Image: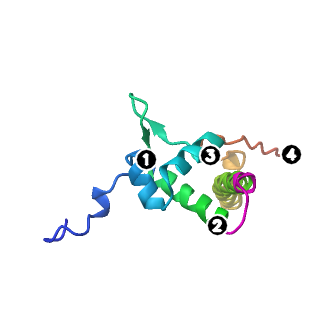
Amino acid sequence: MNDPKGSRPELADLPPPEAAVYVISVAAQLTGLHPQTLRTYERMGLVAPSRTGGGGRRYSARDIEQLRSVAQLSAAGIGLEGVRRILELQNQVAALQQRNAELGAELAAVSQALQQTLSATRAGPPQRRNTLPVLPDSPGSQSVVVWRRSP
């Protein structure tokens, strides 16, 4: 709930980071950049704000953070083409980290299934030895085939 003074909104009151809510003048003020600079960065593909039905730009909190990153890199002496490449590489790293987490979760599920199978093989009756637990399906998952030699 908001405090009585109304000076600090609660997190629930804030829009999600991807919500395009800031007009160009507010985005310029939040980033310390001139509105024309924001338009230039958009033309160069460094930021892609949403558009209203009338064509007005709407920036999200993520767009604001990206613009701040561009401004910091530019202030550090990096040219705009270098900034573009750095942003591309950051996006690639983020995508690879997400894929790595997905693969780690998939590996954990396979490991758990193998542990269950080994436990069932060691402790279970002979007729249960060839049964394998079913792995949960997840988007982008791959199948695992386990071959067992018959006695």
Q: Position of residue 56 (x, y in %)?
A: 42, 36
| Helix, strand or loop at mark 1 | helix
Q: Position of residue 71 (x, y in %)?
A: 59, 61
> Which label sits in the foreground, 4 or 1?
1
Mark in front: 3 vs 4: 3
Per the model, the C-alpha gap separating discs 2 and 1 is: 21 Å
Tell me the kind of residue under disc 3. Leu
- Residue at the location (39% across, 53% down)? 26
Instruction: Identify which residue is drawn at 41% across, 44% down.
Output: 20
The one of 78 and 66 positioned closer to us in this rendering: 78
Instruction: Read off the residue under disc 3.
Output: 135
90, 121: nearer the viewer: 90
Magenta stretch: residue 77 in it? yes
Q: Which is more toward the observer, 24 or 48?
A: 24
In the figure, 103 relative to 57: above or below? Answer: below
- Name the residue that disc number 2 marks: 75
Mark found first going from the N terminus, 2 or 1: 1
Tag 3 near tag 4, CB within 8 Å: no
Kindly identify the amino acid type of the residue bearing the numbered disc 1: Ile
Residue position for label 4? 149
Magenta stretch: give its range.
76-84
Looking at the image, residue 2 sits to the left or right of residue 123; the answer is: left
Q: Circle 1 sits on which residue?
A: 24
Q: What is the secondary structure assignment of the residue under circle 2? A: helix
Q: Is residue 74 above or below residue 27?
A: below
Q: How many marks?
A: 4
User: How many residues crowd mark 2 within 10 Å: few (<14), some (14–19), many (20+)?
Assistant: few
User: Left or right of 67: which side holds 130?
Assistant: right
Mark 3 or mark 4: whose residue is earlier in sequence: 3
Q: Nearer the viewer, mark 4 or mark 2?
A: 2
In front here: 32 or 46? 32
